[in-house]
Amino acid sequence: MAEVSFKHVKKVYPNTESKKDKKNKKNGHGNDGGSNLEVTDEGVLVVKDFNLDIADREFIVLVGPSGCGKSTTLRMIAGLEDITGGEITIDGKVVNDIDPKDRDIAMVFQSYALYPHLSVYDNLAFPLKIRKVPKDQIDKKVREAAETLGITEYLDRKPKALSGGQRQRVAIGRAIVREPKVLLMDEPLSNLDAKLRNQMRAEIIKLRQKIDTTFIYVTHDQVEAMTLGDRIVIMKDGIAQQIGTPTEVFDHPSNIFVAGFIGVPQMNYFDAELKKNGSQYVVEVDGVTVVPCEEKQARLAANNVVPQPITLGVRPEHLVITAPGKDTLSGTVDVSEMMGSSVHLHLDCDGKDVIAIVQTQEIHEVYKDGFPVGREVSFAFDGNVVHMFSKEGTEKNLEF
């Protein structure tokens, strides 16, 4: 079993600023470089009150922008970073003060970290040799790992003779030969080009079906997170914003940050008013009234949400291009991006960029001559696809 648990884990990097710098910041002077990380008397709070239970053989993805604390969280599991507060357990055993070599974990780094003077075979065998595993078992495990990853024909080569994708396979192979309880992966595909990233994502999906271990994967790429993870942890400024399946975080984002981070292209936002018509909630946006579906009505009522100004979110794929009418909004085509099977229309709606996705195989009955720049286009959306966010504080989803 390889269950991993975080209980109120935090990480603080000691503040190395001079007393003068601290005083200036306290008085509102100076610049923190745009970081929103919390600074306390202890130092910079990089990970704050992190709680997560990971099941045996689960594939968890930590995702977020650079500097959000996801790699630091991974390194705390590995023992490469000390834990300032809280507990991390593996198989029910607290590992806060256990050396990395005794945690039964393996880690794959972004930079591959292969030994350039060793062959692929010897790179794969290295972690077993230092554990004094018998030679016949080493040979068996190395060849099994090479077969699993499709690198058997490269066993005699040096890393410099391999492509980026092949090197990453070797790095993964070196981690799995040990059969660790937990496999940590820190942005392993970020150095690869787009085509190789797609191939390696598929390889990792196949790999997790073949080996009996728990995966914890860090990335800033939300496509990787959505395609790989059983569950996703979206992080910002050291705080887990939402934890859920790819479907849950896409369909029911907990706040505006999650809504904007998950999904390509990014969600569209409109200034709107949430009102009540009797017992029914309605949303008014630019003179158009939208009625949220029954499920959303029930959630708003359960939370006792009061009428208020809101930010209305609608994903580009949920905008329907239609003929002008009293229940439609409109914008002027600013940019038209041909994506192959679809066109991404950037519409200028009173100075705000709104993106709509139009399928290219369908000739639109209203806009048969296409969508040239400068053309006015009307669109609408249903009440079952809208997301209603507070304009205050964390800009939370009002359905939560």
Image (cartoon, helix red, strand yellow):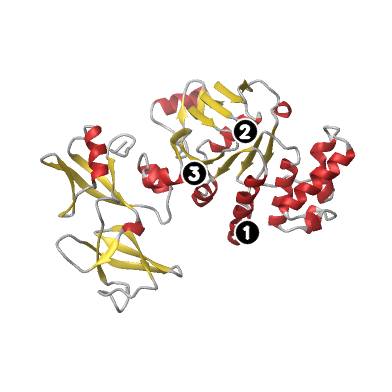
How busy is the neighbourhood of tag 3: few (under 14 within 10 Å), some, or many (20 plus)? some
Of residues 144 and 216, the one drawn nearer to the viewer in this rendering: 144
Location of residue 153 in the rendering, given as x and y in whole percent from the top left corner? 80, 58
The residue at the far bottom in this view is 369
Q: From the viewer's perspective, is 317 left or right of 132?
A: left
3 or 2: tag closer to the N-terminus: 3
**At numbered mark 3, what does the secondary structure look like: helix, strand or loop?**
loop
Location of residue 86 in the rendering, given as x and y in whole percent from the top left corner? 54, 21
* Snapshot quadrant of residue 156: bottom right
Q: Which residue is mark 3?
A: 65
**At numbered mark 1, what does the secondary structure look like: helix, strand or loop?**
helix
1 or 2: tag closer to the N-terminus: 2
Q: Is residue 185 above or below residue 356?
A: above
Q: Which mark is residue 196?
A: 1
Q: Which residue is mark 2?
A: 75
* Snapshot quadrant of residue 105: top right
Q: Are marks 3 and 2 in contact (CB under 8 Å)?
A: no
Q: Are marks 3 and 1 in contact (CB under 8 Å)?
A: no
How busy is the neighbourhood of tag 1: few (under 14 within 10 Å), some, or many (20 plus)? some
Q: Amino acid at mark 3?
A: Pro
Q: What is the C-alpha distance between the residues marked 3 and 1?
A: 22 Å
Q: Is residue 202 above or below residue 124?
A: below
